[in-house]
Image (tube, rainbow, N blue to C red):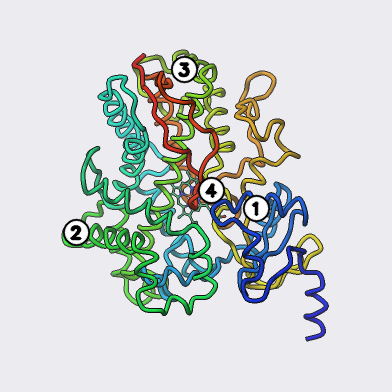
Amino acid sequence: FMKRRKKWNHYPPGPTSLPFIGTMLHIDFRNPHLSFNQLRKKFGNVFHLQNCWTNVVVLNGYKTVKEALVHRSEDFADRPYTPVYEHLGYGSKSEGIAIARYGHVWKELRKFTLSTLRNFGMGKKSLEKRVTEEAGFLCSAVGSEEGRPFDPRFLVNNAVCNVICTTIYGERFDYGDKTFKRLLHLFEKFLNEETGFLPQLLNVVPILLRIPGVPQKVFRGQKEFMDFIDVLVHKHMESWNPAHIRDFTDAFLKEMQKGKVAEENGFNYNNLRLVTADLFGAGSETTSTTLRWAFLYMLLHPEIQNKVQAEIDKVIGRERSPTMEDQVNMPYTNAVIHEVQRYGDVIPLGLPHMTYRDIEFQGFFIPKGTTVITNLTSVLKDEAVWEKPNQFYPEHFLDVNGQFVKREAFMPFSAGRRVCLGEQLARMELFIFFTTLLQKFTFVLPEDQPRPREDGYFAFSRSPYPYLLRAVPR
Ligand code: HEM
């Protein structure tokens, strides 16, 4: 006990804790990244919080976050237990991937998912073809707006979701499909229900979830979203033929047939629905929100849009569809897309991590089982790294000769063992969708509209406020 107390003397500093609620009043749960930036100024790059009796440590700045995620990868690879998801079917035997505890089952499922996505074309020509085809559908839908003002949100969401849906469920939805509109609406509700004080409180005082009706009332959208996923999976199972694997769901079902070993590795029905829900959830909103930031920045910076279009005209021309091979010859466009991801900062706090063992980190003691928040905003906008952290400035990714340069602090996908599993797919979608649309259209602000806001709102991801644009054919 004495040894432990001595170690705890080196616990990171933080705001004063109140009985029961801990430090929860210090955080604006609608804008936690802003509260963290304030606390960082006072307590430094590693500070602690206490959500009721849950210990939380927040890591800030490129150097600190990189040291934790890359150099001490396993120490920080665990995820905190999330009781608010139990009513959706998450439990000790099935945790999906994104919120799964670090261990054997997570490793098996992640390995299987990565290799299956590759088999279905992630990082290869076959998926590129699918993305290019979807970009064509998106262009037609944008074209049918005939230069009138419209909100790009639904069309972009639809296009991005179709890429992930074809890979997982072998299905795409026509733009305007009612069922699909409902799915997207439910997913939006899902994300909103994640944010704010109440979900945080229920997570750390899970006994409140036992009050009859509470989870159903607070998380109604999440439950409906999972019911929807169940319908997709069931429909799929009815037409399943092991001799003909059509997509990710089929491949998972085949794995489930492999008996006891597969069962021990986590291949059960509940994990099938949770893993596909994870891929759908993690793979759609993130990418489509990034694209909406991209179009917004083009509206706000027409001179940058002109330069991208000039490069498209020079390298690809107006007719041929863009391919991933064009990327190396398009340093300016590549830099713009990277800057969209940096400045747009779509997942400001990443996903929560948890220490896998007791650790010493930058002179502090952090006990096993501490929730760790990696403040990605503080990396993507680190004043010690970026010349103009709070401006949209594609030159961050260009050298003096106009050639593309990689930057180590570019971490929108996080890093280390839990790094985003869909990074390759996301990069492909961002490049193909962005260049295809700018090849065909110029985005302009409708005359009678106020200048859109450049700041975003937080609901797990950071999204632009809704805006209207006009897509003028080139
Ligand atoms: C995890 C960002 C697209 C699947 C993550 C994490 C971030 C992230 C920050 C948390 C990593 C951590 O815990 O440290 C993004 C961004 C995207 C994107 C910015 C698009 C621009 C995708 C796509 C897919 C995907 C397209 C699916 C095909 C996942 C999964 C995880 C994850 C499954 C959990 C990984 C694990 O816990 O092992 N992503 N992501 N993401 N992402 Fe993405």
Q: Amino acid under label 2?
A: Lys
> Any atom of ligand 1 within 8 Å of the CB at mark 4?
yes
Mark pair 2, 1: CA separation: 45 Å
The local secondary structure at tag 2 comes to: helix
Question: Could you classify mark 1 by the number of other residues whose Cα lies within 10 Å: few (under 14), some (14-19), or many (20 or more)?
Answer: some
Eye-nearest disc, 3 or 4: 4
- In the image, residue 316 sits, relative to residue 46, either above or below, namely above
Q: Which residue is mark 2?
A: 235
The local secondary structure at tag 4 comes to: loop
The local secondary structure at tag 3 comes to: helix
Mark pair 2, 4: CA separation: 32 Å
- Mark with earlier residue (4, 1): 1
Q: Which mark is residue 262?
A: none
- Quadrant occupied by the C terminus: top left
Q: Which mark is residue 347?
A: 4
- Mark with earlier residue (2, 3): 2
